Every structure is written in C-alpha cells, then in structure tokens.
Image (tube, grey):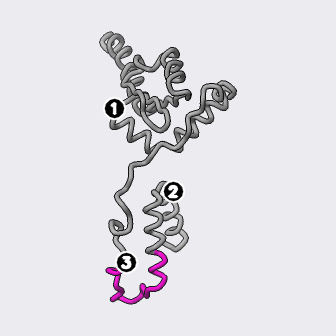
Amino acid sequence: MNHTAIIETIKTELVEANPDTLAYLLEVLRQSKQRDFSSPEMDTASLPSFQQWVAPVQPPRFRGENLPWEAIEKLSIKERGAMQRRLKELNKAWLEEKFASLNALWLMIVDGEVIASGTTKKDYPKPARISEICRQTGKYPFIFINDNALTIEESSSAWNRIGATDFYKS
C-alpha cells in the first residue's frame, strides 16, 4: 500500500472516531516523530497505551436541540424534514444503539433523552400524545423511526398477506 492510499484509509477510519481516540492518535504521531522507526530495536514501550491515555469511554450523547412548538410552527414542512434528516444522520450511532437496546421501531426524544418508544407501528404516538408532550416539556419531540426494523416489518407483513393466500393456490 502506498503512502497516499494509507493516508486515505486512515482518513476514512477516523471519520467517526471519538475525540479521545483522535487525541491519543495525535499524541502517538507526535511522539513517533522523535523516534527512529527504521531501527529494529525501536522502543515502543514508552508510548502511552490507549487505556492510560483516556478515561473510560463515555457513551455517545444525542446531539441536537428540541425547538419550542412555536419555533417548529414557523418552519415549513420541507425545513422540518431537513432538520429531522440532519439530526438522524448526525446521531446515527446513538440512535442505532437506542433502537437495539430498546428493541424499538420508533423513539421519541426530548433534550437528548428517550421519553417514549414503541415496537410496532400500531403504538406510534398519535397527534394528541405529541401535543401533550409539547405542553409538558415546552418543546416539540423528535420522533425517529428505525429504518432497518421498518424494512423487516414491512417485508414480513407483505409475506404474510401474499404467503397466506397466493402461496397455497399454486
């Protein structure tokens, strides 16, 4: 692998690295400039271990702020959708972890906390429930859907409709 390919691979790997990992790698790079890597007896023992360098890794946090209902009302549907998509992408790892740990199809988030979740489309919050949350918190909740689970649920329900009737007719 040539120098350019190595640099590109490193960039790709570091895109989602947490700040502690990046700080550790930067320190190792700085210290390595002072060493002779061509020497077979180079001492790597003096480099700090990752465990020594960082405190215990903190779980990721939700990034984004819930807006008051009045502010949400002023946004167009297109602007609301763009904000929701941007937050979903920004918090992808956090959301995936919450979907998995709660076995959820959807999550309702206020101030970075899951305040409600559900495992089916049937228990998705109704407009009255969302209005109640707005009144209680003063903020409009973010509601995210687990695209992976939705795909599975839709394909299995399609199989049941088709499979239960048409499969046995042939």
Dot 1 or dot 2: first in sequence order is: 2
Mark 2 nearby-residue class (10 Å; few <14, some 14–19, many ≥20): few
Which residue is under mark 2?
15
- Tell me the kind of residue under disc 2: Val
Residue at (50%, 18%) from the top-left corner?
132
Q: Is residue 78 magenta?
A: no
65 vs 96, left or right, is right
Q: Which residue is mark 3?
A: 47
Determine whether 54 is above or below 69 in the image: below
Within 10 angstroms of label 1, few (less than 14), some, or many (20 or more) residues?
A: some
Across the whole image, how many numbered discs are drawn on residues? 3
Badge 3 element: loop
19 relative to 86 in the view: left or right: left
The stretch of residues the image draws in magenta is 29-46
Report the Cα–Cα distance between label 1 and label 3.
41 Å
Per the image, the residue denoted by label 1 is: 103
